[in-house]
Amino acid sequence: LSKTLLFQALEPAARRDLSTYAFTRTHGAGDPIFAAGDEGRAMMAIVTGQVRISLVTPNAREVVLADLHTDEVFGEIALLDGGERSADARALTNVTLLVLERRDVMKVLKAYPESALKLLELLCARIRRSDERMAELAFLDISTRLARALLRILDGPNRTGRKGIQRLSLSQTEMAQMIGSGREPVNRCLKGWERRGVVELKDGWLVVSDRGALELLAAQE
Ligand code: CMP
């Protein structure tokens, strides 16, 4: 718990209090953690593994809102406003979570006001990111959105924890879900990039052959 971003800034007493209330839970890769619309009385911190936050339409189209990694927290929205879960959460890998129940979080938020500020900071960061994504959806074409999404994954924490990886194991459906598009336009875009030597599609891998070209594609307004 002490490593979790949200709690890093807390004074040791607040951290000690919270960790006495938290319990761990594990989920296998692919398991649902909760679904949009569920009642939510707890928030979770990721100890190990990756969690996908997404929304699924009634006709089973999925849009990925975020992939969260070790030390990140989720489930804070329903916990704070008492409403329903705003999105689905699913384990992408085997996952160990620290679970904090509402009543315990509330106790700590009241006793240690700086922990409430930290939570607000987290919410602000998520709103900023959502705003950026909304602007991308409204203003940018599929090629630019896809280039940006791929660079975010390449530069972010990844499943192996290794840096500088230039190949991704992502299906075209997953890429479409990340940028709010259909699979067909993603396929056309990748084929075009492949002809120009930007990427290679090999054995289910997307290999970035020309990172500079991908950055140029991402920079287009
Ligand atoms: P909650 O609504 O309780 O359950 C779904 C969780 O997904 C939500 O809390 C947040 O923790 C997380 N979440 C929802 N939308 C986003 C987003 N756009 N970016 C990152 N996390 C999100």
Image (cartoon, rainbow, N blue to C red):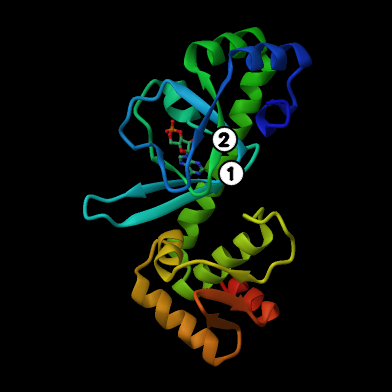
Q: From this view, report whether residue 101 is shown above or below residue 50.
A: above
What type is the residue that disc 1 sits on?
Answer: Gly
What type is the residue that disc 2 sits on?
Answer: Thr
Residue at left 36%, top 71%?
Answer: 183
Residue at left 68%, top 32%?
Answer: 4
Disc 1 designates what residue? 49
210 on left or right of 50: right
Residue at left 54%, top 74%?
Answer: 205
Residue farthest to the left, as pictured: 59
221 on left or right of 157: left
| Number of numbered callouts drawn | 2
| Mark 1 CB lies closer than 8 A to ligand 1 | no
Residue farthest to the right, as pictured: 12
Residue at left 65%, top 37%?
Answer: 71
Identify the disc placed on residue 96.
2
177 on left or right of 215: left
Q: Classify 10 Å Cα crowding around label 2: few (below 14), some (14-19), many (20 and above).
A: many
